[in-house]
Amino acid sequence: MHAASWNIRPIEAGDDAAMASIIRTVMPEFGACGSGFAINDPEVDWMSRAYAQPRSAYFVLERGGVVVGGGGMAPLEGGDADTCELRKMYFLAEARGLGAGSAMMARCLEAARAAGFRRCYLETLAGMDAAMKLYERSGFRRIPGPMGATGHGGCNTFYLLAL
């Protein structure tokens, strides 16, 4: 699988249903359902609108013209003006292991720097090992506890990257 077979682009309104379906497919794979997880965030159904806000961006991964994943960044809720959060990066199983995760991460961090952020925070779940390897390869360092007020009490693993 080579890079030419997939494409990353900004989300459009027409992608909302596909992204909602991907999020609702991937999260339960890792036990990330129920209260305290992003699967229940209202924005799941209207990602294009949620990430049209200032200093926010969301990108989709397309393969053969079909949306198979996504990832984005936005200001950290309850955080300071210098800190953004990497948000809702989910790929269907068929889109994993292609190098697209690293490319998506680079695109999100580029958007974060362009928006003037100095730090990027993320929270995840123990057991999402491939994701955690990607975060660590990308320079994220594990921190002892949560930052901001994301409302995702179900997450138990936290990372921070200096941009």
Image (cartoon, rainbow, N blue to C red):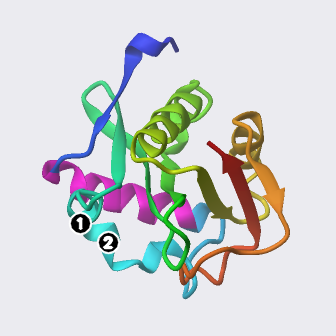
Badge 2 vs badge 1, beta-carbon distance below 8 Å: yes
Residue 83 in which image quadrant: bottom right
- Mark 1 residue element: helix
At x 54% / y 70%, what residue is drawn? 80
Main secondary structure found in the magenta portion = helix
Q: In the rendered view, does 149 fall on the left or right side of 16? A: right
**On the image, numbered disc 2 is attached to which residue?**
43
- Mark 2 residue element: helix
Give the vertical position of 97 relative to 36 (above or below): above
Q: Residues within 10 Å of mark 1 (few under 14, many from 20)?
A: some
Label at residue 82 = none
Which segment did they paint magenta?
13-27
Q: Nearer the viewer, residue 117 or 2?
A: 117
Q: Nearer the viewer, residue 125 or 68?
A: 125
Q: In the rendered view, does 16 fall on the left or right side of 139? A: left
Furthest residue to the left? 14
Type of amino acid under label 1:
Trp
Label at residue 46 = 1
Give the vertical position of 26 relative to 132 (above or below): below
Q: In the rendered view, does 45 fall on the left or right side of 137? A: left
Type of amino acid under label 2:
Glu
Give the vertical position of 81 relative to 16 (above or below): below
Image quarter (top left, top right, bottom left or bottom right) of the C terminus:
top right
Q: Is residue 15 magenta?
A: yes
Give the percent coordinates (x, y) of residue 153. 64, 84
At x 60% / y 61%, what residue is drawn? 29
Q: Nearer the viewer, residue 69 or 80?
A: 80
Q: Residues within 10 Å of mark 2 (few under 14, many from 20)?
A: some
Give the percent coordinates (x, y) of residue 62. 33, 32
Give the vertical position of 4 relative to 138 (above or below): above
Q: Nearer the viewer, residue 141 or 116?
A: 116
At x 47% / y 35%, what residue is drawn? 110
